[in-house]
Amino acid sequence: MIDRRLADLVPPFLLGLVFLAAWELVVRAANVPAIILPAPSAIAARFVVSVPTLAADFWQTIKGVLAGYVLGCGSGLVVAILVDRSDFLRRGLLPFGNLVSALPIVGIAPIMVMWFGFDWPSKAAVVVVMTFFPMLVNTVAGLESASSMERDLMKTYAATDWQTLTALRLPAALPFVFNALKVNTTLAMIGAIVAEFFGTPIVGMGFRISTEVGHLGIDMVWATILVAALTGSAFYGLVAAIERRVTFWHASFRRREA
Amino acid sequence: MTETASMFRPAADGFGSPRSPEPAIEVSDVSLRFETRDGPVHALSHVQLKVARGEFVSFIGPSGCGKTTLLRAVADLETPTLGDIRVEGMSAEEARLKRRYGYVFQAPALYPWRTVARNIALPLEIMGFAKPEREARVKKGLELVNLGGFGNKFPWQLSGGMQQRASIARALSFDPDILLMDEPFGALDEIVRDMLNQQLLRLWEVTGKTVLFVTHSIPEAVFLSTHIVVMSPRPGRITDIIACNFPRDRQLEIRETPEFLAIANRVRHGLRAGHSYDG
Amino acid sequence: MKSLLPITTVVLAVLAIWYVAAATLNADLQRDAYANAGRTDYSTAELIVDSLNMERPKLPGPHQVASEMVKSIVVISPTSKRSLVYHGLITLEETLIGFAIGAALGIGLAVVIVSVRWLDRSLTPWLIASQTVPIIALAPMIVVILNQFDITGVAPKAAIAAYLSFFPITVGMVKGLRAPDPLQLDLMRTYSASQSQTFLKLRAPMSAPYFFASMKIGAAAALVGAIVAEVTKSEDGGLGARLLAGSYYGQTVQIWAALFAAAALSAVLVGIVGLVGRIAEHRMGFVR
Ligand SMILES: Nc1ncnc2c1ncn2[C@@H]1O[C@H](COP(=O)(O)OP(=O)(O)OP(=O)(O)O)[C@@H](O)[C@H]1O
Ligand SMILES: [Mg+2]
């Protein structure tokens, strides 16, 4: 099992190495100016000397990301369960939620900065709005996902609505909930970083990117993007790992001899 | 409708042992129509049926003749368009709310996030049984269907037949008076089927439950039942009801006897008649 | 049609909440304004009405946004820089060019990935990982780099729109082209079908629902890309530039109007893609 997984990692790892080597070579051979594309080695060097700055930016941004993520996902889940009780509300809110999910919500960033100030709460507010609707829509769909036979079974037990919810519909909705949780990790990062383009105290990944771009400190921009990429992947990986543990029974994970 | 149909139209006064005056299940002139996009489907048409307590009634008929629909109507999972269904003197809905029957679906319908044992415990949890009682019943149920060592497995780790057995244990776990079984053994091999047939028969003999049992197998129907209801499609209706008066403690060997074969033949004729309408 | 009443109710409820929120949020500002003007004799009703009609409110009332939109879409000539039509068209152009490029590249890469085994094994994990990276962070840098090459105007923004729609489209299409199950693929093998036959007769048609789903996501992503790009390079106009200008000068009504214009644009784009998809899927028998 473990061996297989490791073996699966070899080709992408090799491709990554080849890609980095090619990048380094091209930059050196063609003498590409650092303000256009710095070599990976230059980015790495910049990264190492800037660890304190990058760490401070990371903490500043992650505060908004996490606070917004928890609030947005949490309220989306709760509202979905409440809405689910009423067919009327579900029918009214679902098209609305679907519409809003497809909108460029990051655009509210300047408004949130005006309302909640430059510091991380305004970023958290953007993230709340961005993550709320995907969670709402997915959870509502998930609560509907139990098969009719599974529901009939609960009916033959004369189960109450609450029992049907806790014993059948919520567990059946979990894969959908996790889907939203995963999508929302990326949305949360995007929301927080873009909101920082609209104003922050002088720290934060979005702030770093926009100011360094202004000074043509492109190596620092890349170093910050590296941090953002690692953070985003780690965040996603964490949620995916929890998903694997909680919804191990779902068809996409299960193994007969597990 | 047609001559054959009226010839076999069952008597409305019912059948079965006279031990109890009130029938366990009484279906009076039930019709059920599904409205689909391509027009109405007459799944059941003027169905009359009385089942006394303790009877074992099998339903047999070509695919699409309304066997599942009839069972679902008795379980209050479908509502008849016309007619009335009474279960133990109550309406079908009351009987469902009073949890009078256990239903075994055509597919196992086990919840993949629960172990086999917790699947069997599901109705017990919902009906508020205490934990020790639940554990005892689950253990008994697992043994009854020969799944002793598999309680902690997840359903998707079992074969189809094992899953179906688990779903039977689940239906039996809360000891309902009535069992509604929709092709419970359809997915099993002949040997396991024979074994479960015998076990079901023992269980029925000991507990005196009323069983409605859908099957496509003539020998299975004849072997298990006190009555066999033959159905025919378009519109779904009952064309014959055949009594099978073998002793309750019958053994597999009776399948070789001339009486058995005679009844099996009559069922086969009834089925053929049903099929000829498709023509 | 059964949903008409519920949707109307929800919309009305949202409007009501909005009005209450606007009045509450703006009341303090309005009180300050009264104090500055030396007025103390205002009634509550007056306070509420004035709070909902401030020039630079914290949250403008819906009617203010609506009238600003009417003004900047209908009244002002579309050639003026104060017209939302002017800015909307710029954004739309960038979005459409970017989306077309992103979709072409995304689909192309997906086809290559499912056909070339070694690429699949080495590239797919990176593609999936790319989904978890906030790639939008790259947008300002791309604008600057392209600027170094004298690429300005629509091009850098379309590039970002393309690049933002590219990843979700690739991922969706790889999934779609992989949608046939082993049994269906085995069937093609029993016919000893060539790779291209399998592709044309099985993979491509099977991927149609995924295609339209990823097109919808891609269109929305392209618009977000265009808007964010406009924020980072605002001198050429566009809805993102309107947002940024509004936030510089505290013109909240203008921000909201631009926001709604962007929302409408996105809804129309996604709606058109969705409609085409619905019709096509219907014809192909994916939905009954
Ligand atoms: N929910 C439904 N909507 C529309 N038509 C239905 C529905 N359920 C069943 N039918 C139709 O009713 C008829 C009877 O179906 P039913 O499932 O009762 O057949 P059956 O005798 O159990 O068949 P099988 O032996 O294949 O299980 C069929 O023609 C079927 O197409
Ligand atoms: Mg059936």
Image: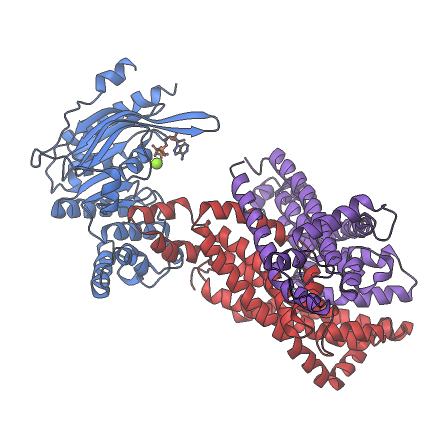
Toward the viewer: B43 or C81? C81
Q: Let me know if residue B154 appears in the view.
A: yes
Residue B222 located left or right of residue A182:
left
User: Which of the colour schemes (rainbow, by chain, secondary structure, one colour) is used?
Assistant: by chain
In the depicted structure, whether residue C88 falls above or below residue B10: below
In the depicted structure, whether residue B10 falls above or below residue B126: above
The chain drawn in purple is C
Toward the viewer: A87 or B260? A87
- Which residue occupies 57% across, 60% down? A132
- Which residue occupies 58% across, 35% down? C285
Residue C34 on image: x %, y %:
69, 65
Which image quadrant is residue A120 in? bottom right
Residue A191 located left or right of residue A39:
left
Which image quadrant is residue B246 in? top left
Residue A186 located left or right of residue A220:
left
> In the image, ligand 2 is in what quadrant?
top left
Residue C232 on image: x %, y %:
80, 65
Q: How many marks?
A: 0
Q: Let me know if residue C181 appears in the view.
A: no
The chain drawn in red is A
Residue C77 located left or right of residue A60:
right
Q: Residue furthest top?
A: B3
- Which residue occupies 50% across, 51% down? A141
In the depicted structure, whether residue B182 falls above or below residue C133: above
Residue A42 on image: x %, y %:
81, 80
Toward the viewer: A97 or B198? A97
Residue C147 on image: x %, y %:
89, 64
Assign the C terminus of chain B to one quadrant of the image.
top left
Q: Residue furthest front?
A: C41
Q: Colour of chain B?
A: blue
Q: Residue furthest left?
A: B19
